[in-house]
Image: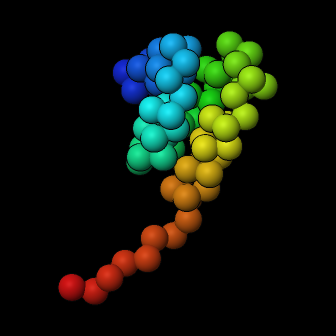
Amino acid sequence: MSEWVTKMLALIKSGNLPAALAQIKATTSSKDLRHLHAALDKAQLLPKLQGVETAINDQLQALASPRLSRSP
């Protein structure tokens, strides 16, 4: 588990959900997001945190989408 996932778990468990959601929306690593989702599922926290699960799924979908690029 990466350091980011460990910090996110601590942030979520402390109840600072706005900060956790902001960090989830800013991450660029789908691997970390999948690890965070698995850790929350293992701790049985996902049913209580629908907003966090939605943010993780939305960010995973955004990272999987093709990027639009601008020409220089």
| Residue 29, image x, y percentages | 44, 43
The colour style of the image is: rainbow
Is residue 50 shown above or below 63?
above
Residue 29 in view of the camera? no
In the image, 51 versus 59, the foreground residue is: 51
Residue drawn at (54%, 29%) of the image:
17
Q: Nearer the viewer, residue 12 or 3?
A: 12
One can see residue 56 in this view:
yes
10 above or below 4?
Answer: above
Residue 26 coordinates in the image, percent (x, y): 41, 46
Task: Check the image and name the residue furthest to the right.
Answer: 47
Q: Is residue 45 left or right of residue 16?
A: right
Q: Which of the image's four quarters has the C terminus? A: bottom left
41 vs 12, left or right, is right
Left or right: residue 18 versus residue 47 is: left
Q: Residue at x 40, y 26 (%)?
A: 4
Hey, which quadrant is residue 7 in on the image?
top left
Total number of numbered labels? 0
Q: Position of residue 16 (x, y in %)?
A: 50, 23
Quadrant of residue 46 in the image?
Answer: top right
**Which residue does the image show at 37% across and 78% down from the upper left?**
69
